[in-house]
Amino acid sequence: DALRRGDVRAALLALSDCNALKACQNLRVSLLVQLGLFDAALEVAGSVAGADVEALRKTAESARHATSLALEALLGGDLVKTELQLSVALGVAPMSSDLLLLRAEAAMRQGDFDRALEEARHARRLAVAVTEVESELGRDAVLREGSPPEAVMALLGRALLAIGVPDAARQNFVGCERLRADTAVADAGLFDQFTSVVLGGFASCTELAHAAQLLATDAAFLRAGDGLWQTTVSLAEAFLQEHGRHWVHFNASFWGLEAQAAICLAHGEANLSDVSVTNHGALSFSSCEAVASAPAAMLDRLLPESVITCLTVLSVSLERAGNLEGALQRATEAEVMLDLNNVEHLAADVRLLRERLVQAKRARRTEAEDLDEEPKIDLPTDHYEVLGLLKDATLAEIKAAYRQLALKYHPDKNSDPEAVRIFLRIQQAYEVLSDTDRRKRFDSGDTTDDRDTTSANMKPMQFRVVEVDKETGIAKVWWFDPNTGEEGYMDMEVDVEEDHDDGDKRTLREHCCLP
């Protein structure tokens, strides 16, 4: 009954009261095999005759051999063989803390830290159950075999540290060292046989605790950087190199991903703001890809803002490399994360990027293809018409019209689903007409710029309503153009019934681009 419930402690205690009975001895052998205590099982089996016990003895020998092969493969770096042999052994001994510990270590070396944590916790529960029986019955040479609790705590601490929980990790390292000190004389050999596996290259749990503290300190220093992208990249690369020498699969850990996100954001900031650094160190967009490809559980632990921005930077880099499908995929992932998290200040950039990519993809399709994202309305092709200007408009008039329309259809201010498309069209018109050479080409009938311009290099205007005069229906709005560095104030009409939060949301029917 205890075995069916999975209660190892109760099963061991029940069998301890009937050692003299053959039936109990058979059950005892079976339980020891399931616990992975193969030497103990073989010792008991040697004192009992019978076909059933002989079959159990052969099973125990086979599983013990598979365990030895798994440990050998793990130490040799053959993780495929390790997993194969562990599957064989765990099929016989599903409650073995030793085997679960080895499988947790294999998961650590594959960078699957969440699975490692789950396996280590399971191993700890089983190891504690056996230890509790020992404390109640006294030390029993038949039961005392396998990984000691301190070894399990060492691996548990490493897994916790890898997913970004340093305080809990250090508690396990400290507990491991205390247990090690308490059992140093009696069980030195037992701990030593697992040392090379569970300590991950460190000499002791004390060293693990010290390294964990140093890691957390360096990570805090990296987060508090001076804001310069060159400094951020330098610090993050040094951080990855230093701690990557000590921790297995460090780049896939929470700390490694956080540092790679910093590199991605810094390179992205430089690349998107200064054309002269476009080829800087290939921009290390592998860092962006590492963050974007991380497991969902690990992404949930990173700052949503960092992940969304990494996806955006990666999308832009893929677009520039001509990989439109990949760019659209990453932009879509960024938009999904945007919907799941409250990161409003990134909404405009993400939605504008995705709409631009959708339009670029649509332009590549042939007429025979299914246009599942066909626009609901047609937008004018004449840039002057888009901005509501005459062909002799001055640059000042072009800028003023752009600012008014950009505010009116800014994705952060206008909830209509067509606002993003119209905003991009406004940006495209402004980008052509505000450039003297490109405007001349457009005026002469050359529309090459229309095909080449997707507003990929333009950043959206920033606006803030300063005050609203509800009697006159006029709002005073501060504006900033990140593309030119210009800023100022402008007046905008608002509905006197609306407050300033909704005053800049206008109906799309009034726009030139709609029927």
Image (cartoon, rainbow, N blue to C red):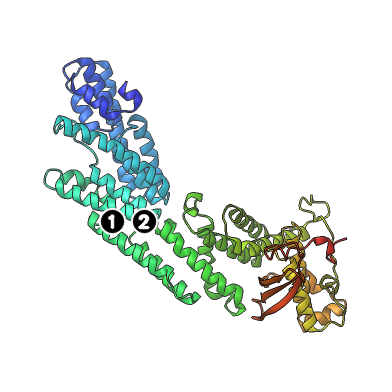
Element type at marker 2? loop
Q: CA distance from mark 2 to mark 1?
A: 9 Å
Quadrant hosting residue 246: bottom left
Relative placement, left or right, of 47 versus 357 is: left
- Marks 2/1 in contact by CB < 8 Å: the verdict is yes
* View extreme (left): residue: 185
Which residue is at a point 68% across and 80% down the rendered structure image? 488
Residue 491 locus on image (x, y percent): 74, 75
Give the amino acid at mark 2. Val
Residue 456 locus on image (x, y percent): 68, 69
Relative placement, left or right, of 443 versus 460 is: right
Q: Is residue 452 visible?
A: no
Residue 255 locus on image (x, y percent): 41, 60
Which residue is at a point 34% across and 34% down the rendered structure image? 89
On residue 248, the disc is 2
**Which residue has dot 1 on it?**
201
Please tell me whether residue 163 is drawn above or below residue 429 in the rendered image.
Answer: above
On residue 388, the disc is none
Q: Nearer the viewer, residue 25 or 458?
A: 458
- How many marks the image carries: the answer is 2
Binning the other alpha carbons within 10 Å of mark 1 as few (below 14), some (14 to 19) or many (20 upward) gives some
Q: Is residue 215 visible?
A: yes
Which residue is at a point 78% across and 61% down the rendered structure image? 363
In the rendered image, the quadrant that contains the N terminus is: top left
